[in-house]
Image: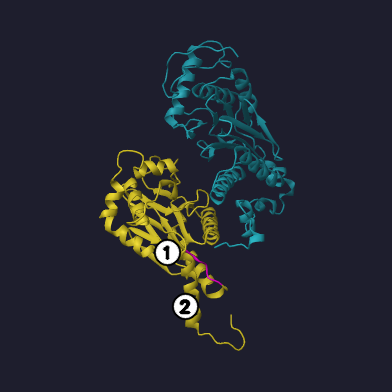
Chain colours: A yellow, B cyan
Amino acid sequence: MSMPGMYVSPEQLMQDRADYARKGIARGRSLVTLEYGSGIALVAENASATLRKVSEIYDRIAFGGVGRYIEFDQLRIAGVRHAELKGYQYSRSDVEARSLANQYAQMLGQFFTHELKPLEVEIVVVEVGIGDESNQLYRIQYDGTVMDEEAYCCIGGDADAVRERVAEGYDPELDADAAIRLARAALAGPEREIAAPDLEVALLESNLEDATHRRRCFRRLEDDEVEVALGDSADQPDESSDQEDS
Amino acid sequence: MPFFAPGDDPGASFLELLRRTGSEPFAGLAQVPGAEGGFGALERSHATTVLAVRSSEGVVVAGDRRATSGNLISHRDMRKVFPADSYSAVAIAGAAGPAVQMVRLFQLQLEYYEKIEGKPLSLEGKANQLAEMLRAHLPQAMRGLPVVPIFAGFDPVDGRGRLFQYDVTGGRYEEQDYATAGSGSLHAGTVLKLGFRDDLSEPEALTLSVQALWHAADEDSATGGPDPVRGIYPVLAAIGSEGFRQLSDAESGAVFADLQVELSGGGSGGAARSGSTGGDPSSAGGSRSEVSP
């Protein structure tokens, strides 16, 4: 990166890169991940029905990304490859979110320090625990910083404000529908409403009826399912606005 | 973590990813020195009966549980029918090791494609993937370790069950009514041929499959029959619009119990019979009508 006749201090260089990455991330909408009674919900504001922010990585592991789509989608694919290769070489039970999060952190850190431009992304990697195991939520930033979060985790330009709103309404015993409603209210804030088609929702469900047939815990909710969960169409019209008031 | 440059990306193929990360999935046996002469002693490799029958709801897939090693029975509870994904199944005949490995790669490939691309392969695409794996496996097949699968699934586009038969060279042949593979396939195929009707319901197709397996086991030493002493019954699976469902041992046992009643009490031969309770396959007994082939 050094150019002849010009000195830039390392502090300044890193600062510039961090600012660049943050600006890119701040342009996009946020994403909320929260644990509920029997799983983990991933809820993103996303007007596109095909360019997804939330995806399945492996049996119990899901991925969420915000920022530049092409960049976090590359990370998603690299994660699927890492997980599938590991599961093939060892066993499906050896694939876990912690190691995946570390791999992501290394990769993002590598990009941040050695490439011309850092990746303008922020991602979450979550794993749902089965039985007595606890859930794992990892948040990984553009520079490779990993954070091990509990209960909920927010990424994106507006993450801090969204996190505060989630914190106000959060209860670990929420059911899936209530978790989705809370996430929507938190993403929207007091001044906006987000309609069901602009939400992308997926669940990692731990209460599998039949473990052999439901190995894959990831389930993406279709628009009509999201509508039902939000209560937009039927009996609980006031639920989400209640949470916004609180 | 595997990361590829844009022009250099292996795409949605898991096999290609394996190759690119240094583990050729079909290399192992081809490189064994001295394998040129073939694994002659192991060549009783079609020893199995697996089959698939189309029903009005979708398709039924079934297979016996016996694995043999020469004259010995090496496993009594082997499974040769596997879910390929939620809407399809693969059943295998042939050398057990490579066959099971191929199924595993096939399952991984379908799931991998679905995750990378964001939507599942078409049923035809899945059938072609399996053909490609068989072609890659041909060198080992020539050394005496063939794999001959049947692939069957519910096609959501057509809204019906479809089934595919293969040969060791990767030849792929779509069948309309039923498909069989393995050493007992001749006997099983005859029973299916005689008992098949275009409007078989799922319980009827299950009953017909069980009859076919029973007759195959009756004539072929390498095909295992029902084993009520140990509670081991052939694997039965049904795929319809609701997806893949494997019957429990108790359910399979009940279908066989029906057959036993019919064979011991019902008179002549039984090869061309098709039970039709029209209801739950697990309900033992029940009224039964004879259907002419």
Foreground residue, A218 or A54? A54
Q: Where are the magenta residues, as a range?
A: A117-121
Q: Where does residue B142 sit, x and y in percent of width and height?
A: 72, 43
Q: Main secondary structure of the magenta part?
A: loop
Q: Give the spatial CA distance, label 2 vs label 1.
A: 18 Å
Residue at the outermost bottom position: A5
- In the picture, measured across the screen, residue A140 lies left or right of residue B61, that is left
- Identify the disc placed on residue A15: 2
Q: Mark 2 vs mark 1: which is more N-terminal? A: 2
Residue type pointed to by label 2:
Gln
The residue sitting at 72% across, 52% down in the picture is B34
- Please tell me whether residue B158 belongs to the stretch shown in magenta: no
Residue A7's quadrant in the figure?
bottom right
Residue type pointed to by label 1:
Gly
Q: Where does residue A92 sit, x and y in percent of width and height?
A: 48, 52
Front tag of 2 and 1: 1
The chain identifier of the residue carrying mark 1 reads A
Foreground residue, A144 or A69? A69
Residue at the outermost left position: A246
The residue sitting at 71% across, 54% down in the picture is B33
Give yes or no for contact between labels 2 and 1 (Cβ–Cβ under 8 Å): no
- In the picture, measured across the screen, residue B155 lies left or right of residue A209, that is right
Quadrant into which the C terminus of chain B falls: top right
Q: Which residue is mark 1?
A: A157
- Please tell me whether residue A120 belongs to the stretch shown in magenta: yes
